[in-house]
Image (tube, rainbow, N blue to C red):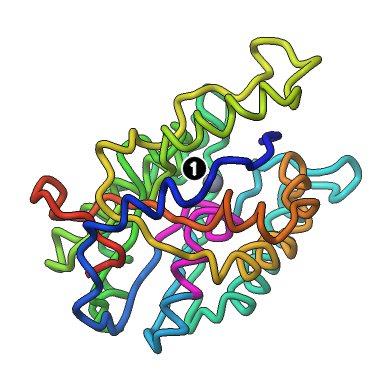
């Protein structure tokens, strides 16, 4: 990601005017993520906000992230990368204030279309029922009230992210606990990319190298808009400890507080009651 953040945030806050205000205190929320670092960009704001509300926050990270790209010379093997990334997610969880971190330990499936997809140990090839039961066990043990997984395309089509969607949905079915789907707001992303392109951010990149507009879910299919502007610093700091994964995100550390609030001050989800005509501002 290379764009700058210049979209007026009040455009998105206006959406919240008709919002359903948070009416119920959520006691325990389980966030299911694919790789160490996905928690930072996608949900660290709502996790930190939940903590500020006194809720119990559980982070379940599915894979070791050993297929991730890393700066040259950072580690010498996939095993070492897995070890580093497990430590990084623990540090990130501590910054967010996560009450319990569970590492499911599956092998990273790699980006769609890569050789790693066919590794029998890859998360995307694991038995769905078996994984869902592992997550359901945690849900029952902790008395979880809400699960947060991903949308059906996992945000951008990564096999591990799509698996997270399936596992979260199935674990919700097994336990009867409602499941929210965290994702990116495609319209917001497109708007940011358009502005970034206009300001010359992508100059010198070929058509292939430019970010595509197929991230996340169109805004019309989202009903949960969580204001996390007061927690963007937590997001930034949690991202910062994923030292092995700074390629392509280093721009974040150059943004001003105001830019951070504009670009990362809202997190989007699809509620299990999508279609009832309500806009939500919390997982309630
Ligand atoms: Zn990921």
160 part of magenta stretch: no
* Outermost residue to the bottom: 54
Specify the quadrant of the image occupied by residue 114: top right
Vertical relation: 281 (above or below) 248? below
Q: Nearer the viewer, residue 218 or 138?
A: 218
In the rendered image, residue 235, in percent from the top left (x then y), is placed at 61, 64
Residue at (77, 54) in percent of width and height? 253
Task: Give the magenta range.
Answer: 32-48
Residue at (38, 51) in percent of width and height? 268
Vertical relation: 254 (above or below) 43? above
- Quadrant the C terminus occupies: bottom left
Tell me the element at label 1: loop
Horizontal placement of 248 versus 96: left or right?
right
| Label 1 beta carbon within 8 A of ligand 1 | no
* Outermost residue to the right: 73
In the rendered image, residue 99, in percent from the top left (x then y), is placed at 48, 84
Q: Nearer the viewer, residue 205 or 127?
A: 205
In the rendered image, residue 185, in percent from the top left (x then y), is placed at 41, 41
């Amino acid at each position: 990601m290379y764009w700058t953040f210049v979209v007026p945030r009040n455009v998105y806050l206006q959406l919240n005017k008709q919002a359903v205000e948070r009416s119920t205190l959520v006691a325990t929320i389980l966030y299911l993520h694919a790789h160490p670092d996905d928690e930072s960009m996608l949900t660290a704001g709502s996790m930190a906000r939940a903590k500020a509300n006194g809720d119990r926050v559980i982070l379940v990270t599915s894979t070791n992230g050993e297929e991730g790209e890393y700066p040259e010379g950072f580690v010498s093997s996939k095993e070492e990368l897995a070890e580093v990334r497990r430590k990084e997610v623990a540090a990130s969880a501590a910054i967010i204030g996560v009450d319990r971190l569970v590492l499911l330990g599956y092998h990273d499936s790699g980006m769609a279309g890569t050789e790693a997809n066919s590794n029998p140990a890859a998360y995307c090839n694991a038995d769905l029922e078996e994984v869902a039961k592992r997550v359901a066990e945690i849900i029952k043990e902790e008395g979880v009230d809400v699960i947060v997984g991903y949308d059906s395309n996992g945000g951008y089509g990564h096999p591990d992210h799509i698996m997270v969607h399936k596992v979260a949905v199935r674990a919700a079915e097994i336990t009867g606990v409602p499941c929210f789907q965290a994702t990116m707001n495609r319209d917001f992303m497109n708007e940011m990319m358009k502005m970034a392109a206009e300001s010359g951010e992508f100059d010198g990149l070929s058509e292939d190298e430019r970010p595509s507009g197929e991230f996340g879910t169109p805004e019309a299919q989202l009903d949960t808009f969580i204001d996390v502007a007061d927690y963007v610093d937590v997001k930034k700091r949690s991202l910062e400890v994923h030292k092995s994964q700074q390629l392509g995100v280093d721009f974040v550390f150059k943004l001003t507080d105001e830019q951070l609030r504009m670009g990362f001050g809202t997190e989007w989800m699809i509620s299990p009651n999508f279609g009832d005509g309500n806009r939500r501002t919390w997982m309630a």
